[in-house]
Amino acid sequence: GGADSTALLLALLAVGQPCRAVHFQHGLRGEAALADEQWCREFCCQRGTAFQSLPLQVPERRQAGESIEEAARRLRLEAWRDLSAAGRLPVLLAHHLDDCLEDLLLKLARGGNASGLCGLREYRRMGPLRLYRPLLSWRKAALEEYVRSCGVAEWRLDATNQDNSCRRNAVRNIILPQFRQAFAGDAGVQQALLALRQDADYLEAQAATALCEVSSLESWQRLHPALLPRVLRLWLEREFGQSGAPSGKLVRRLQGSLQNFRDRSV
């Protein structure tokens, strides 16, 4: 029900693309979230669009060591796999350019590699799941203007987005505005994001080739450090159906084990 997802739905309807709108209830905001769901249901009903709401029950289904945000993301991906009929139906998401810049800074603070820093891409395949993000070149303000141009004067606003104790909100509301003021905008960060996507695409293609060649301990030891986490991700997906990047802790454990075996063989 936000401006971005509303813009995406309106754009799909404008080009005559049949679709189903999905609303996730995270179980986090009580009555406000129920009001959002009702608004979305009525919005779709007025336009003859199929609508489905799914309860994710994030607090109850959160796993040990997961943040609320991590749990919500995992549960959404699980739901998308089911909704997409194991990947036969594409999933379109409404992330935009401002989301990409926020994500870049958050991942940088966590120590992400190039693939992580530009994790929001126009197309990603996660196991059988096909994710499309057609709005990544749009600023949020432009999406809001597009919604208004379609005759829609309002959309849903999440009051928790103003809580700057949440890191993403702090990046959006404090850090990025100060950065833009200091550097007369964020054109340089946008250019860095494009370069990171190119680097990540190349490294991931190299990792896909290397995956076919890792059949022994020695072949894992020969992998360049830039390829190791990417090959590990592909290997986990192939062998166990586990999608998503392996944790930094797991990558470091593997690196340490490979080094220990190398030291013993010397």
Image (cartoon, rainbow, N blue to C red):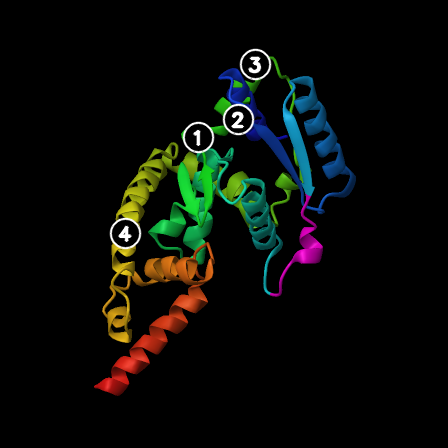
Q: Which residue is mark 3?
A: 150
Residue at position x 43%, y 40% in the image: 101
Q: Which residue is mark 4?
A: 203
CA gap, disc 2 and disc 4:
31 Å
Q: Secondary structure at mark 4?
A: helix
Q: Closest to the observer: 187 or 17?
A: 17
User: What type is the residue that disc 2 sits on?
Assistant: Leu
Q: Earlier in the sequence, mark 2 or mark 1?
A: 2
- Cβ atoms under marks 2 and 1 closer than 8 Å: yes
Mark 1, other Cα within 10 Å: few <14 / some 14–19 / many ≥20? some
Q: Closest to the observer: 136 or 123?
A: 123
Which region is colored magenta? 55-64
The image shows residue 219, relative to residue 83, as above or below, that is below
The image shows residue 5, relative to residue 211, as above or below, that is above
Q: Which residue is mark 2?
A: 8
Q: Which residue is mark 1?
A: 134
User: What type is the residue that disc 1 sits on?
Assistant: Pro
- Counting from the top left corner in percent of width and height, residue 236 is at 42, 62
